[in-house]
Image (cartoon, rainbow, N blue to C red):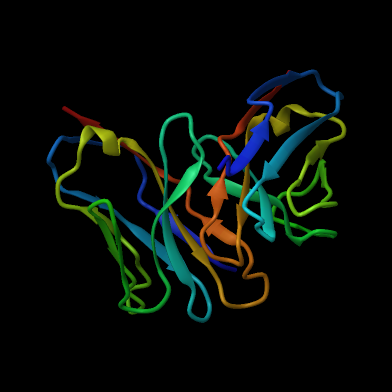
């Protein structure tokens, strides 16, 4: 059972480049989330989804976009990368609103 | 809005020492409270939870009691091990609108030395 799988694990972008962080889960969870973790700042919610076709903004959505075309996949899109988006990104999923299962993270640097 | 405040880290202990990590919260209604743990290089994992006042969550020797009168959910362990070295996050999920979202504290890094 793979759980929550994120790719890539590491990425370096130049300012203004675009990329998609991939997230897939095989637990048939309805809820999925994207968080960013900045040093000493805990986790901030970027976007979340309560089911296929439904997404909503979290605390820090600016500069990001998401889609949820299937139950399994929840990609996060950065359109014009900025240094402020340097962070570790975590995808998570849950059945209902209980226990969240996290992926192992994507470390992104924007230079 | 809902918020969680954790004690500042880092915390460094010797093996078999007693651990307390303080967590207090601000929320309306009756939130559910959680402790998550992040081991080096990994994502967060749920450690324990409590869903109503006076509930005690426990797992792997860790305990935390939901204290509504002091709005606290402190994490304790009687005897820590080197393998407990990690970052610990307190979190809450509210009962008002937007309760799908967990609110996390900033995390407390624990290092246990042999």
Q: Quadrant of residue A49?
A: bottom right
Residue at far front of view: A1
Going 60% across and 68% down the picture, which residue do you hit? B1
Residue A105: x and y in percent read 59, 34
Residue B73: x and y in percent read 34, 64
Q: Is residue B89 above or below residue A96?
A: above
Q: Is residue A103 left or right of residue B60?
A: right
Q: Quadrant of residue A96?
A: bottom right
Q: Nearer the viewer, residue B86 or A38?
A: B86
Q: Quadrant of the C terminus of chain A?
A: top right
Q: Quadrant of the N terminus of chain A?
A: top right
Count all numbered tags in the image, as a single digit.
Answer: 0
Going 22% across and 53% down the picture, which residue do you hit? B61
Q: Is residue B104 left or right of residue B48?
A: right
Going 62% across and 78% down the picture, which residue do you hit? B96
Q: Nearer the viewer, residue B85 or B106?
A: B85
Q: Is residue B62 left or right of residue B30?
A: left
Going 53% across and 65% down the picture, which residue do you hit? A98
Residue B40: x and y in percent read 42, 30
């Amino acid at each position: 059972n793979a759980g929550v799988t994120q790719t890539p694990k590491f990425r370096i972008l130049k300012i203004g480049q675009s990329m998609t962080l991939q997230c897939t889960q095989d637990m048939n969870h309805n809820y999925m989330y994207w968080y960013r973790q900045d040093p000493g700042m805990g986790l901030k919610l970027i976007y979340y989804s309560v089911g296929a076709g439904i997404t909503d903004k979290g605390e820090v959505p600016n500069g990001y976009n998401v889609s949820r075309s299937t139950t399994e996949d929840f990609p996060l899109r950065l359109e014009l990368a900025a240094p402020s988006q340097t962070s570790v990104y975590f995808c998570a999923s849950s059945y209902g609103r209980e226990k969240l299962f996290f992926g192992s993270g994507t470390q992104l640097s924007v230079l | 809005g809902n918020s969680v405040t954790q004690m500042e880290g880092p915390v460094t202990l010797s093996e078999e020492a007693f651990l307390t990590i303080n967590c207090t919260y601000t929320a309306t209604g009756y939130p559910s409270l959680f402790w998550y743990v992040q081991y080096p290089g990994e994502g967060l994992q749920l450690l324990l939870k409590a869903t109503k006042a006076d509930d005690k969550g426990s797992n792997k020797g860790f305990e935390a009691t939901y204290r509504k009168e002091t709005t606290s959910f402190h994490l304790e362990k009687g005897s820590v091990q080197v393998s407990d070295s990690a970052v610990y996050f307190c979190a809450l999920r509210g009962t008002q609108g937007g309760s799908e979202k967990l609110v996390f504290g900033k995390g407390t890094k624990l290092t246990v030395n042999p």
